[in-house]
């Protein structure tokens, strides 16, 4: 929302997101139902594998930065059947995969920060993943928002020193 507000102040042209087009009394209940549906039935469930299994396994072997890069690439390749079946658009599948990877890898970093910062809370990762998947139509708008998101991820990587192994949370099991 902040990125959209800044883009509007700068005079950038973009399609207004749904939170601007519809009254709160309409989009808030729909958004809430959609959030819990996504968390229970679709994308949020991926977090049990990505952050619940793969993140701690990789962080035992390497630092959170490299672990997250690996997860981000695997995560996008996990969606390859959907790309090949046209779910994520038509066109050259390689172009679609690479462009989606530019979005998924920063999201993987955000979820890694949540996982490590919460000392391994899969629930927070599921909830965050579900928020991102279910709310994009309501809040997406300007490309400036995407750039701000990437900058936030970069600042988090630097502040949390994710290239250091001691920045990793590794459950004791």
Image (tube, rainbow, N blue to C red):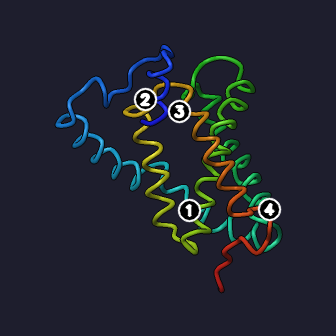
Residue 165 horizontal side relative to residue 51, left or right = right
Q: Residue furthest bottom?
A: 172
Earlier in the chain: of badge 2 and badge 4, it is 2
Asked if disc 2 and disc 3 are in contact, CB closer than 8 Å, the reply is no
Q: How many marks?
A: 4
How crowded pointer 1 is (Cα within 10 Å; few <14, some 14-19, many 20+) is rated as some
Q: Which residue is mark 1?
A: 114
Asked if disc 4 and disc 1 are in contact, CB closer than 8 Å, the reply is no
Q: CA distance from mark 1 to mark 2?
A: 26 Å
Mark 2 or 3: the one toward you: 2
Label 2, secondary structure: give it. Answer: helix
Q: Quadrant of residue 20?
A: top left
Q: Which residue is mark 4?
A: 163
Earlier in the chain: of badge 4 and badge 1, it is 1
Identify which residue is drawn at 76% across, 75% down: 166
Q: Which residue is mark 3?
A: 145
Residue 95: mark: none
Identify which residue is drawn at 79% across, 71% down: 165
Residue 46 horizontal side relative to residue 130, left or right = right
Earlier in the chain: of badge 4 and badge 3, it is 3
Identify which residue is drawn at 59% across, 28% down: 85
Return the residue nearer the eye: 63 or 172.
Answer: 63
Earlier in the chain: of badge 2 and badge 3, it is 2
Q: Which residue is mark 2?
A: 5
Label 4, secondary structure: give it. Answer: loop
Q: Which part of the image, by quadrant, shows the N terminus?
A: top left
Identify which residue is drawn at 68% across, 65% down: 55
């Amino acid at each position: 929302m902040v990125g959209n507000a800044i883009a509007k102040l700068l005079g950038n042209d973009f399609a207004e997101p749904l939170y601007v087009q519809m009254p709160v009394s309409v989009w808030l209940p729909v958004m809430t139902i959609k959030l819990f549906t996504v968390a229970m039935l679709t994308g949020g469930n991926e977090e049990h594998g990505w952050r619940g299994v793969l993140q701690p396994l990789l962080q035992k072997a390497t630092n959170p930065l490299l672990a997250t890069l690996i997860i981000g690439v695997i995560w996008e390749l996990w969606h390859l059947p959907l790309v090949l079946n046209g779910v994520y658009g038509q066109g050259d599948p390689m172009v679609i995969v690479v462009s989606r990877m530019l979005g998924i890898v920063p999201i993987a970093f955000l979820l890694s920060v949540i996982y490590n910062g919460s000392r391994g809370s899969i629930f927070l990762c599921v909830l965050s993943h579900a928020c991102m998947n279910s709310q994009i139509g309501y809040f997406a708008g300007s490309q400036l928002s995407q750039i701000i998101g990437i900058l936030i991820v970069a600042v988090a990587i630097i502040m949390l020193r994710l290239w250091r192994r001691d920045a990793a949370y590794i459950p004791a099991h």
